[in-house]
Image: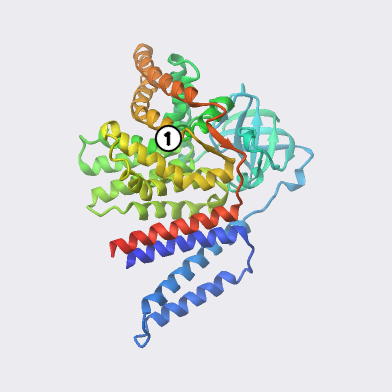
Amino acid sequence: MRTLFLYIGIISFLTGVTIRLLFIFDFFFPFILFFIAVIFFILSKKERYCHTEVFVIISVTTLFFSFGIFRVDILESGRTFLLDSSLGTYSEHTGTVITDIERKENYNRFTVATRGEKILIYTNPLEKILYGDELILSGVLRKPEIFYDVDNLSNGKAFDWPQFLAKDEIYYELFYPTLVNTGKGDLSLFQNIKRGLFITKESFIKNVHKVVSEPEASLLAGEVLGQKSSLGNELQESLRRTGIIHVVVLSGYNVTIIADSIMRSLSFLPNAVSLYLGIGGIILFTLMTGALATVVRASIMAVLVILARRYGRLYDITIALLFAGFLMVLHNPAIILYDPSFQLSFLATMGLLYVSPFVEKFFKFIPKKLGMREIFGATIGTQIFVLPLLVYLVGQISLVSLPVNILVLPAIPLTMLFGFMTGVFGFISYHLSFVFGLVSAVFLSYQLFVVNFFDGSYSALIGIHISLWEVIFVYFGLFMYFIFRKKDRAI
């Protein structure tokens, strides 16, 4: 029963956050709901009432729903917009780089914190800037604007760039400012650790580029570190049309491989030591990749698996998924509506849990060698579950996703292993790195061959549109069906 209450509480919280992001309520509304929750909880303690469990469920639902609304109220009350007075005028700003540098073909992009606000900066790609550097920036400050997604023009749909940035409390942009880099700013211990991790990541990627040619090198950086910014629009669009883009955005599949590799490499140590080193390794990897939503979600779940095994507890993967979502939304409520990476990662995992096992039953004729049947079921399951959101976001459906995933996914673990060794040995010996790079290049060339073979005008349906409310309605029904179906079977 406690597990059921946990399910209901987390789902109610996530629902409250979503509803509050879509609508504005009176400030006292969540307090009224809290008062109602207390009343029903008190009634549940009265023995003269029948079905007291119903009162408890109503109390838990109302309490967590009100908490979700209140959490968004706190988020929105903290918005200050202190730099509005500088909009549209040439001004100077001094701040510290607080994100990793996103290196595109034509520009670098990063975020600077200054005077209690965040500014998204675009600079020349040749600028040498690192996380934690203190910059003096001069230019014209602007508000983000809605625009058509240049990385996916096929859907002809406007991308709400202001809302996407607002989820990270970024309300200003500065394009190609005059820039003076005064060096490393006054950083905390945590910030110094992040700076070191980002520098290590850049060195790792440079090691890969020394021995692996393009576009294989950028594809490898995407698969191992989620660094897809240098792939180029054409290759990214090909990966998207063929339904394999998830391999370069560090999906749960990639993170699971990495977490498992970390734990296996530490298995010779005492249990307690390997436990904390393994968790520490996962956390450091998450930070090094920029703490992307997909990585954070998968890392939380990986840590929960490790802790469950260590302390002999049963691991309920559905609770782990909901708990990971709860923690992430509690930290930043806006991601539930305005971060596609979080949404797709969450939904893909739901599809993997509930649809894939069902699908596999119908394909017993497919051999289990190399995990073929599992890959087949996982691909169909995740595609079914993310389909409504994908159609809403990009307006297209890949028609070749199934064969491409079946052909590519078996090669990913070995590609990541040899790719990781390529980057690591680059710090030690060019020749050893070159050997591992050759093996990596073979796997990467094979993947690109599969993508190019299936990519074409026939590979995806485009121009499909559905409304946000239709998407919310579909997923609410799916969540309720699968979660309570699972609970009914357990009872």
Determine the residue located farthest toward the top in the rendered image.
Answer: 431
Residue 203 visible (yes or no): no
Q: Nearer the viewer, residue 73 or 47?
A: 47
Q: What color scheme is it?
A: rainbow
Which residue is label 1 attached to? 402
Looking at the picture, how far across and down is residue 439, in whole percent?
Answer: 35, 17
Looking at the picture, how far across and down is residue 371, in whole percent?
Answer: 30, 34
Bin the neighbour count of mark 1 within 10 Å (Cα to Cα): few under 14, some 14-19, many 20 and up: some
Quarter of the picture holding the C terminus: bottom left
Residue 267 visible (yes or no): yes
Looking at the picture, how far across and down is residue 50, in whole percent?
Answer: 36, 83
199 vs 491: above or below: above
Q: Secondary structure at mark 1?
A: helix
Q: Nearer the viewer, residue 147 or 279?
A: 147
User: Quadrant of residue 251 in the image?
Assistant: top left
Q: Amino acid at mark 1?
A: Leu
Quarter of the picture holding the N terminus: bottom left
Q: Tell whether 247 sits left or right of 487.
A: right
Q: Residue at x 63, y 34 (%)?
A: 154
Determine the residue located farthest toward the bottom in the rendered image.
Answer: 48
Q: Tell whether 180 sits left or right of 286.
A: right
Q: Tell whether 97 sits left or right of 411.
A: right
Q: Residue at x 28, y 37 (%)?
A: 365
Q: Residue at x 46, y 20 (%)?
A: 216
Q: Nearer the viewer, residue 44 or 442?
A: 442
* Numbered label tally: 1
Looking at the picture, how far across and down is residue 361, in whole percent?
Answer: 30, 45
Q: Nearer the viewer, residue 379 or 348?
A: 379
Determine the residue located farthest toward the right in the rendered image.
Answer: 89
Q: Residue at x 60, y 24 (%)?
A: 105
